[in-house]
Image: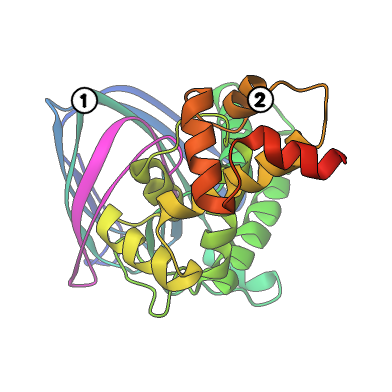
Amino acid sequence: MQETSAAVSHCRLVSGQVVSSIVAEAANVRVEILGRRTGGRISWQFCQPKLALFWYRRGFARFRLEIGGRPVSSRLSPKVSLGLFPAGVEVAGEFEGGDQCEYAVVFLAPAFIVAHRGLDFKRPLAAFGHEHLKQGLAGLCREAMAPDNLFDLFAEGWAMQALAQLSRAERAEGAPGPSAEWRGGLPPASLRRVEDYIRANLSAAINLADLADIAGLSRRHFLRAFCASVGGTPLGHVRALRIEQAKRHLSDARRSITDVALECGFSHAQHFATSFRMATGVTPPSAFRCQRLS
């Protein structure tokens, strides 16, 4: 499918067969929800006169693109499934994934963006995660599937909230591309998201690939940036946070050593005892409990 505007440089060329298409328009917002049969690959050329926010909903695994002539590649996942392309930015390349894919794209009118405190987005975000923004997009898509006479009002309200979220994310992170290496470590907002995820999932398995996805970086770049930010590896940091949580739980005499071990992400009591001794010099954890409760 190819679409051209009055300006020759504006185009959309996407491979694959369209199997579903929903379009809803408001005064300043255009929503498209598309499904394609792709055979596992999508070639893509894109340059539009409006800011475009993409949600790669299903069937996308990774991409290799050139954005303004600069090569960019990254994995995509449910946690990292958004893309932002400012007006006039030229994008070309290929997506890989399943035989079928589904995505949504929202176009925002330039005048609407500038009218709200002069916001201006210049740098693309080819792949990033933002849970609140994605939840808002899901609501907008539901409204777009059955628009009524209040859709224009709903869409404009969503757009104002989305602009605020995007502007904050851009200021916090400096809008690096998904494979861009943040010199000196992770951007503060990325590090905060990674920390929040680790703390919320200490009892579960945590792997490098998931943490890299949350930060929007390749595993190699994430590992380097994380070490620069924290002064240690992700695995070591996760272990340290688990030990700190274990110390708090051991202060509660009602919890058994085995329960504390499992709640803090250790596979069994012996694994916990070994890790605890290496971190604190005290063995077994029951000795630490005795010290705390004495």
Label 1 or label 2, whichever lies nearer to me, is 2
Q: Name the residue under label 1.
A: 98
**Residue at 63% in and 27% down:** 263
Identity of the amino acid at label 1?
Gly
Q: What stretch is highlighted in magenta?
A: 53-80
Which element type, helix, strand or loop, lies under badge 2? helix
Nearest the eye: 61 or 290:
290
Q: In the rendered structure, which disc, 1 or 2, sits on the residue that comes first in sequence? A: 1
* Relative height, residue 10 to residue 145 (above, below): below
| Residue 168, quarter of the rendered image | bottom right
Q: Is residue 86 visible?
A: no
Disc 1 secondary structure class: strand
Q: How crowded is mark 2: few (under 14 residues within 10 Å), some or many (20 or more)?
A: many
What count of labels does the image hold? 2
Q: Residue 182, percent across and down?
A: 39, 74
Side (left or right) of 12 relative to 267: left
Residue 288, can we see it? yes
Where is residue 151, by image quadrant?
Answer: top right
Residue 257, disc: 2
What residue sits 35% from the left and 65% below the top? 177
* Relative side of 150 to 91, left or right: right
Which secondary structure is most common in the magenta stretch? strand
| Image quadrant in which the N terminus is located | top left
Amino acid at pointer 2: Ile
Instruction: Reply yes or no: does residue 244 show up in magenta.
Output: no
- Residue at the right extreme? 294
